[in-house]
Image (spheres, coloured by chain):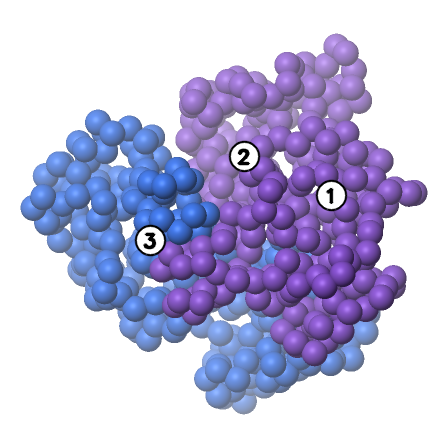
Chain colours: A purple, B blue
Amino acid sequence: MKVQGFAGGTLDRADQIRTNPARLAEALADPRARLLVLDGLDPVAGEDGDLAWTSLPPGASLQQMILLGVDERGPVFAELRSEIPHGAAFAPAVWRLAPLLRPEALALYGCARSMIDWHKRHGFCANCGMPTHVTKAGWSRSCGGCEAEHFARVDPVTIMLAEHRGKILVGRQARFPAGRYSALAGFIEPGEAIEEAVARELWEEAGIRVHSVRYVRSQPWPFPSSLMIACIGQTDDPALTLDTTEIEDAMWVDADGVRAALAGDPDAPFIAPPPIAVAHWLLRHWVEGVG
Amino acid sequence: MKVQGFAGGTLDRADQIRTNPARLAEALADPRARLLVLDGLDPVAGEDGDLAWTSLPPGASLQQMILLGVDERGPVFAELRSEIPHGAAFAPAVWRLAPLLRPEALALYGCARSMIDWHKRHGFCANCGMPTHVTKAGWSRSCGGCEAEHFARVDPVTIMLAEHRGKILVGRQARFPAGRYSALAGFIEPGEAIEEAVARELWEEAGIRVHSVRYVRSQPWPFPSSLMIACIGQTDDPALTLDTTEIEDAMWVDADGVRAALAGDPDAPFIAPPPIAVAHWLLRHWVEGVG
């Protein structure tokens, strides 16, 4: 995997079809149209690093379909599912299959997962409590009562390294596999710029003040609908005060330690996050100055 | 104004109080606690660039209050309002008052506005349709039926310049004041990295392909709850195909033209967005290479 997982999508999202009833009906009736095969919310591998596909069910309704986009093989749909579990939690099947999928297939899957999960949890209008129905080819839901339109949520999250004199801060949550440390992270709140959220999270979780925050890269993360925004900030005082409700442990690691962790060295000071996670690429960026 | 509007907040958001009932009750009972004065959803100016404040009403309930945070003067609250209009649209009072407010006061106001507006539109559970109630000091709402917890939304939006041989692309929407051009913008969708959303939006709205997208800065924008993420991308082909449902006009402008617009020169090729908007600082960054 050469990029963080779930990024690198190549599907044309064809937004001009979403609001055009005639073109949308045409896409649904297109004999080339194909439907993403899923196991609950989990991916199913097809051939040559692709996902598994099937044809649309006879009489498929736009109330049950998301038009993910269009590629050279035709329109691409995902089906809304009422029986799926809430998808916010870990998904072992994703971790197992991700290395087998091409980046663009994993990206397409991630988008479908976020969208299906969002529909599952948004059948009612937050404004008035009435049932909502699918609109804009599955990209929004509209209320029959108050006419509010609700768009699929994307939740921006900062994920960041603090840096101090040639070392960076990594931490672990209690739920992590043994030995795993990663960048700290937290949701951006209303009223915050990205850089301000980075500073607040590092203060809340680790008790350190950072400045000179710089953006590195980003990643869609479909558990259920995060946009991970990876940054590095500088601190002048490395003394830690951990919020142990969030962080079980944290430590400062030098470049040799990070390199060893990324190389999977059994003597490394920690086990690095896998390449599917943007934290892996953030660590790599820090030691290599690239990527 | 030295920073984009609504950024630069200095309030300690005191997240450790939000989930601590004893400390929260203490904050509510604190005689120093103060309440933000609003005119509907609009700000009211106080003294010396501050906002206007009042004391908490007797018997104030946590079901009606958001604890915005704590500063050296004590706990800071905003009140939930049921009578306010939907705040997504323009707000002339904000534009009029913003230049009179200190940046940190405008940032505090923006956060309060986003939060109050979010509560107003989220009285019901999107998952099951039952009424929700205020939790975590106003930072979430919880459902009495299915027990789902809903956090205030932050919607990431890309706002971007395309660059081609010393010129950048600015465009205008039909609703803009006469002569005003700005950076193009659009919501990030599920399954996209920031850079991918920039490329998609420029393709959809202007028909140009960009690469080498770089992040410049970000801004919280409380109409109603956007996180503006400002970027610049490169294009090799400047031929435009405008989506006229989104963009009324667009044009390539050189650095002299952008400088003239930022200086308010009446002969400038366009009227620049004001300093409250991150687009102003994105243009300034492009011509000055700083900020």
Disc 3 target residue:
B123
Label 2 Cα crowd, 10 Å radius (few <14 / some 14-19 / many 20+)? many
**Chain on which label 2 sits:** A
Marking on residue A185: 2
Check if mark 1's residue and mark 2's residue have beta carbons within 8 Å: no
Residue A5 sits above or below residue A22 on the image: above
> Between disc 1 and disc 2, whose residue precedes?
1
Residue located at (41% from left, 40% from top): B146
Residue located at (75% from left, 10% from top): A267
Q: Report the front residue among A178 and A53.
A: A53
Check if mark 3's residue and mark 2's residue have beta carbons within 8 Å: no
Check if mark 3's residue and mark 1's residue have beta carbons within 8 Å: no
Distance from label 3 to label 2 (Cα)?
A: 29 Å
Disc 1 target residue:
A38
Residue at the extreme top: A267
Residue A24's quadrant in the figure?
bottom right
Residue located at (35% from left, 66% from top): B87
Q: Judge left or right: residue A190 versus residue B45.
A: right
**Chain on which label 3 sits:** B
- Residue kind at label 2, given as amino acid type: Ala
Element under label 3? loop
Q: Judge left or right: residue A279 versus residue B220.
A: right
Q: Report the front residue among B80 and B210.
A: B80
Residue A72's quadrant in the figure?
bottom right
